[in-house]
Image (cartoon, rainbow, N blue to C red):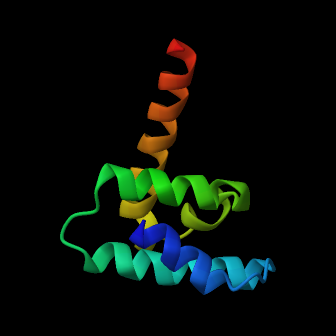
């Protein structure tokens, strides 16, 4: 929940592109500073950030490559789990 909390705290209920970009930047810094981010933490972040279209912000900058990779994998897993149920 650490990453999701960081994202929402950084966003501060401002939903302009610059605010969203800043929230992803600060969340990415936390993600990179952690030795290991659990799958649960990544799923929680995906749940709160997916409505802000993370691919729009995270795929344009190599600095976000690791975070984007984890979020994309979590998204694919959720879709796969959903299709099985």
Q: Quadrant of the C terminus?
A: top right
- Residue located 28% across and 62% down the image: 37
- Residue located 64% across and 79% down the image: 21
72, above or below 50, in the image: above
56 or 52, which lies in front?
52
Does the image show residue 63? yes
Relative placement, left or right, of 31 versus 21 is: left
Please, which residue is most extreme toward the top here?
A: 84
28, above or below 66, in the image: below
Rendering quarter of residue 41:
bottom left
Q: Quadrant of the N terminus?
A: bottom left
- Residue located 59% across and 85% down the image: 10
Does the image show residue 22? no
23 or 55, which lies in front?
23
Relative placement, left or right, of 79 versus 18 is: left
Relative placement, left or right, of 6 versus 9 is: left
* Total count of labels: 0
Relative placement, left or right, of 65 versus 21 is: left
- Residue located 61% across and 60% down the image: 48
Residue 62: x %, y % from top left: 44, 69
Residue 9: x %, y % from top left: 59, 83
């Amino acid at each position: 929940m650490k990453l999701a909390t960081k994202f929402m705290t950084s966003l501060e209920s401002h939903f302009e592109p610059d605010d969203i970009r800043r929230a992803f930047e600060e969340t990415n810094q936390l993600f990179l500073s952690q030795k290991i981010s659990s799958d649960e933490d990544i799923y929680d972040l995906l749940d709160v950030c997916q409505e802000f279209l993370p691919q729009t912000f995270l795929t344009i900058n190599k600095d976000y490559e690791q975070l984007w990779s984890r979020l994309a994998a979590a998204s694919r897993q959720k879709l796969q789990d959903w299709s099985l149920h």
